[in-house]
Image: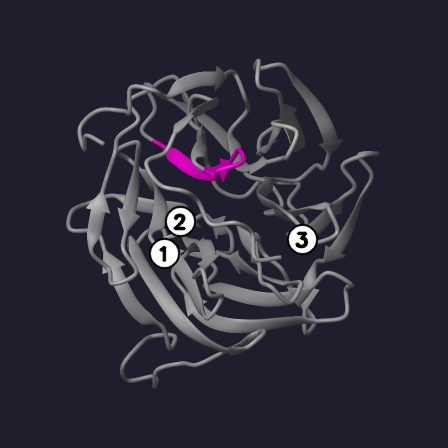
Amino acid sequence: MSAADKPSNFRLLAEDLRFPEGPVWLPDGTVLCVEIQAGTLTAIERNGKRSVVAQLGGGPNGAVLGPDGACYVCNNGGFAWAQRDGRLVTAGTPSDYSGGSIQRVDLASGRFETLYNKCDGEPLRGPNDLVFDAHGGFYFTDPGKLRGRAMDRGSVFYARVDGSLIREVIHPMSIPNGVGLSPDGATLYVVETETARLWSWPIKRPGELEKLPWYESPHGGHLVHTAASFTRYDSLKVEADGNICLATLDIGAVTVISADGDLVEQPRMNFGDTHVTNLCFGDADLQTAWLTLSHTGKLVTGRWPRAGLKSLA
């Protein structure tokens, strides 16, 4: 793949979406994505036809299929919005913000419920992205919210789908965003948006991480990679071979990093949008990718040079 131009086989599947994120491939070929500004979970068929699955309100962000077949959504509570150079951008916290949550959506009926909205009595601020492990639990990031000149310090949590456990496992972080697991499920990856740093933690047992001492790391993580020049990283997905694919803002790319922290490639999409915010893999060989380009409201798809990682759940 060229580092300068989009892969020639990528095509536009849907447009005029209202800040799409969190793509999820379904076995029937449909792709789900959230529309953050619209507050919806939306289904998009192979021909581009779309329909609303659930009206979730707030700001649905990351999404993933759970082991029970339901869709689990990080709801950040919503953003204020603005137009900049003809593009839709986030603009802080809205006046009607009431907190963030983890939502469970029944895909057959569209009914949804709030699974978590606090941890140890502390409200969730703005959950962003999540990943399931092989034990049926999930890790999720919460970067917090921006209020004028003030910003929350972010956290990472571990929770169970039955509502019986939620635990803060990492704090503080600087806008934690994408989260993923290594193919063997033994390593947790989290990327910070503004620092453009990818971190890792060995997993001792579900929801328990092995951490470096405080004087070696701000939160116990191992630094895997940091950008060599200005950009920011959003959500991430892991390939079957262990590479970590980082949706890359400002340059409209996907940055692919090896587990050792080396840059593998950085293909740019060039669909007229600088903000590739998320991606997923699908089809039988998990070698088709779908990418959200949020500022212009596009979903694009094409063949990827390597297979994505099958869900561990």
Q: Compared with residue 203, is residue 283 higher up or lower down, i.e. above or below? A: above
- Asked if disc 3 and disc 1 are in contact, CB closer than 8 Å, the reply is no
Task: Name the spot of residue 48 as percent of width and height, x first.
Answer: 57, 15
Determine which residue is flagged by label 2: 239
Separation of marks 3 and 1 at Cα, in angstroms: 30 Å
- Asked if disc 2 and disc 1 are in contact, CB closer than 8 Å, the reply is yes
Residue 175 relative to residue 168: left or right: left
Residue 80 appears in the picture as rendered: no
Say which amino acid is labelled 1: Gly
Circle 2 SS class: loop
Q: Residue 79's quadrant in the figure?
A: top right
Residue 38 appears in the picture as rendered: yes
Separation of marks 2 and 1 at Cα, in angstroms: 5 Å
Give the crowd class for mark 1: few <14, some 14-19, many >=20 residues within 10 Å.
some
Task: Name the spot of residue 205 as percent of width and height, x first.
Answer: 55, 79
Q: Earlier in the sequence, mark 3 or mark 1?
A: 3
Q: Which residues are magenta?
A: 275-286
Say which amino acid is labelled 3: Ser
Determine which residue is flagged by label 1: 242
**Residue at image point 19% right, 30% down:** 2
Separation of marks 3 and 2 at Cα, in angstroms: 28 Å
Determine which residue is flagged by label 3: 101
